[in-house]
Amino acid sequence: MAEYKIERLGGFAGFGLPGSHLASRGRIAAAQLEQQVQDALEALFAKHAKARRPATRGPARDMFSYRITRTTDSGEQSIEVPEADVPGALINCIKDELI
Amino acid sequence: MICHCRIIPPNVLERLSQDKRLTEAERKHFFNMAAYEAHWRKLRTVALLSSSHAAALGSMSATVAAAAAPAITVYNCANGTNLPGAPVPNPGSSTDVTAKRTFVETTGVADFYRQIFKRNSVDNLGMTLQSSIHYGVKYNNAFWNGQQMTYGDGDGNIFVDFTLGNDVIAHELTHGVTQFTARLGYSNQAGGLNESMSDVFGSMFRQWSAKQNVKQADWLIGSDIMGPGAKAHGYTCLRDMAKPGAAHCLAPQPTHFSEFKPNMDPHESSGIPNLAFYKAAVAIGGYSWEKAGQVWYQALVAYRPSPSMKMRTFANRTRRQAKLLFRADPSVFKAIDAAWIAVGL
């Protein structure tokens, strides 16, 4: 069964940086997501998997980016995308924590 | 030779701004004219529509100096994520303490830039400073999106309301200043410099507001937004400009350029120039904005945009500006030079 892992990165506070004591992670089974969210994620992976570098953030500064990892029978695939591209249902499953 | 005419095409202004046969002051003048060209086109159109506004076509410096202070506006996202949200009427007297605080502190940052650096808003042309508050639900972040500032309420555990940190507000606003001046990118060394500019001017604003000299200042970034959960674990700040690698930082940083790695996040690599500023300011003494701050500001604004600037280039610009601005006080150059050498630059 496919599963999505999501990790919040950066921001003013520097989530998920090496040495940082801030992490924000979550995971959710694909089956728990509405079909339109799954379709949006499919499109997101198709768009960003082709990119050789993470999407640029334009003039935005201190905004979060997100690393989304999809696990399927054929293995893991990760993309790094800006906050505006991430479906809300996926963002809602993550939790900020001290590590 | 300083030309005050308004009909030089932008490409010519650009070329003149790089012409080595001209003096530095002349090149800077043409660079500024090129940077303001788009604004001037709009001003010219408005002015020509009304002959009563013909006086607006006076000299650039006079007009910029006479421009009104920027309007400060606050919007309420009401825990949604659509920007800018609903306007907050009269935010300076709002019963929403976050709205009132955002208005007061943003006004303070605008005053700081005007009084200390003679800068009129982020674009130096009086651009409205717009902020959105109550963004998202328990949102642990603040950001500049290229046009405005946005603040989350924090989750109440790791972080509290991000507007409680006046250094946070000055940090985000300074991203706007950088966008309109050096246009530093957001990756590699330029990204670290970009973040450092925001921490440096954020910390300076916090010190200026509290009338603290370099010895009284704590040099912490984000100390006023730490929540009870973070404090209980001994974290007192996000970053410490004096000790970037300290254990009390939620996000420790490198302290020497030898630790820099390509593609390092800007919030990590900024520790290197942050430490250089701290060392320079403390060695110079007094108030950070009087000498070290002036040098850093000129190194940021007095050159043509450098989206891919290297840290060493910025360091050398501060060395040059220290000599230019404080010719009669060589201790400023010595302090700044030693500070950069100490961090490997």
Image (cartoon, helix red, strand yellow):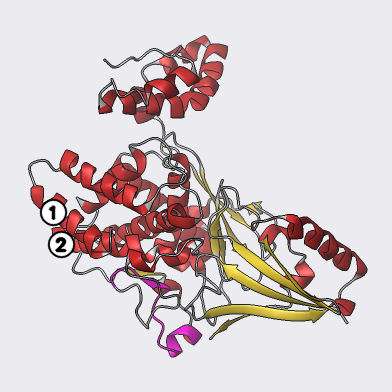
Expressed as whole percent of the image width and height from the top left, the position of residue B99 reads 53, 59
Residue A78 locus on image (x, y percent): 72, 69
Q: Nearer the viewer, mark 1 or mark 2?
A: 1
Determine the secondary structure under disc 1. helix
Q: Nearer the viewer, residue B181 or B212?
A: B181
The stretch of residues the image draws in magenta is: B229-242
State whether residue B138 appears in this view. Answer: yes
Residue at image coords 40%, 87%: B234
- The N terminus of chain B, quarter of image: top left
Q: Quadrant of residue B164?
A: bottom left
Give the residue number, with chain letter if any, for mark 1. Answer: B334
- Residue bearing mark 2: B283
Q: Left or right: B287 with respect to B36?
A: left
> What amino acid does circle 2 point to?
Ala
Marking on residue B53: none
Assess whether mark 2 and mark 1 are in contact (beta carbons under 8 angstroms): yes
In the rendered image, the vertical position of residue B11 relative to residue A60, given as above or below: above
Label 2 neighbourhood size at 10 Å, few (<14), some (14-19), many (20+)? some
- Chain designation of label 1: B
Residue A63 located left or right of residue B29: right
Residue drawn 44% across the image and 24% down it: B14
| SS label for mark 2 | helix
B52 in magenta = no
Callout count: 2
Q: Position of residue A16 (x, y in %)?
A: 56, 74
Image quadrant assignment for residue A97? bottom right
Residue most extreme to the right: A35
Residue B70 appears in the figure: no
Q: Amino acid at mark 1?
A: Lys
Residue B49, position in %: x, y? 57, 13
